[in-house]
Amino acid sequence: MKIYSVFDPEFKPYGQIVEGMEETIQEILNVLKDTPLPEATGYVPEEPMLQELPAMIEVSEHLYGGMPVQLGWCNGHNTKLNCLEYHRDSEFNLGTENFILLLAKQSEIQDGVLDTAKVKAFWVPAGVMIECYATTLHYAPCHADPDKGFRVLVALPQGTNTDKPVFTAKSWEERLLRARNKWLLAHPESPEAADGTYIGLVGENIDIANLI
């Protein structure tokens, strides 16, 4: 598997680089660097220390057009794909260290299944904020350096990835709904599949450990 850069043209169908928010980015990084670094992977939808920053207003106004937002984090160590998820909106990421994202496109899901051969890897340099479009499938970052791990901002509309709403399903896609505004496809070898997540990934459960 080739690891592209988010500055390469191959990234354009998946997202874009955020420009013009240097002060906001630095403010977030100053707090993000002090968040926990688990041995595995940890996720917090809304981090109070980030939520209290003026940067939260900047993200709301300039990146989400005034929508209520949550600033959380996904930190730790990881090299595997395991799952892919999508939301009904873009997600913004920013790392204190270099990290790698494994991405695919929602349009590549066929009959409720996605072949992991469609997945591409993208290197995200430390301090660069990116937008992953709503149609971009993604999941936990991968570390670029096992000694440093990753600390990555996860900015989303408020309420995303919280408790799943209760209602009667009306379409096949609702089998994928794992939390609020979170549609998730698991690889059969993943811990999430063992926990009851919809199995929608076929092929190799990608592991980039030998590429970094």
Image (spheres, rainbow, N blue to C red):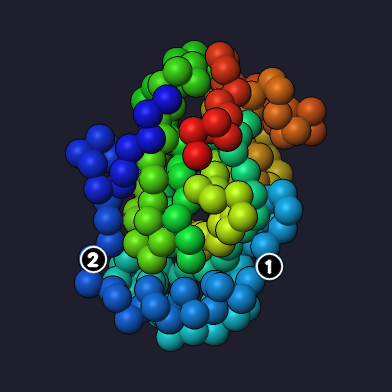
Above-or-below relation of 40 to 154 = above
Whether residue 187 is visible: yes
Q: Nearer the viewer, mark 2 or mark 1?
A: 1
Above-or-below relation of 160 to 70 = above
| Residue 7 point in image, percent of width and height | 25, 48
Front position in the image: 41 or 125? 125
Question: Extreme right residue here?
Answer: 195
How many marks do you count on the picture? 2
| Residue 158 point in image, percent of width and height | 53, 64
Give the image quarter of residue 49: bottom right
Q: Residue at x 28, y 40 (%)?
A: 11
In the image, what residue type sits under mark 2? Glu
- Rounded to the nearest angstrom, the CA distance separating label 2 from label 1 is 27 Å
Whether residue 157 is visible: no
Give the image quarter of residue 183: top right
| Callout 1 secondary element | loop
In the rendering, which numbered label is found on residue 175?
none
Q: Residue at x 49, y 16 (%)?
A: 115
| Callout 2 secondary element | loop
Q: Residue at x 71, y 44 (%)?
A: 166
| Residue 179 point in image, percent of width and height | 65, 46
Local crowd size for mark 1, using a 10 Å CA cut-off: few (<14), some (14–19), many (≥20): some
In the image, what residue type sits under mark 1? Pro
| Residue 96 point in image, percent of width and height | 48, 66
Give the labeled residue for mark 1. Answer: 36
Above-or-below relation of 48 to 127 = below
Front position in the image: 58 or 9? 9
Mark earlier in primary sequence (2, 1): 2
Give the labeled residue for mark 2. Answer: 19
Front position in the image: 137 or 140? 140
Above-or-below relation of 139 to 129 = above
Give the image quarter of residue 64: bottom left
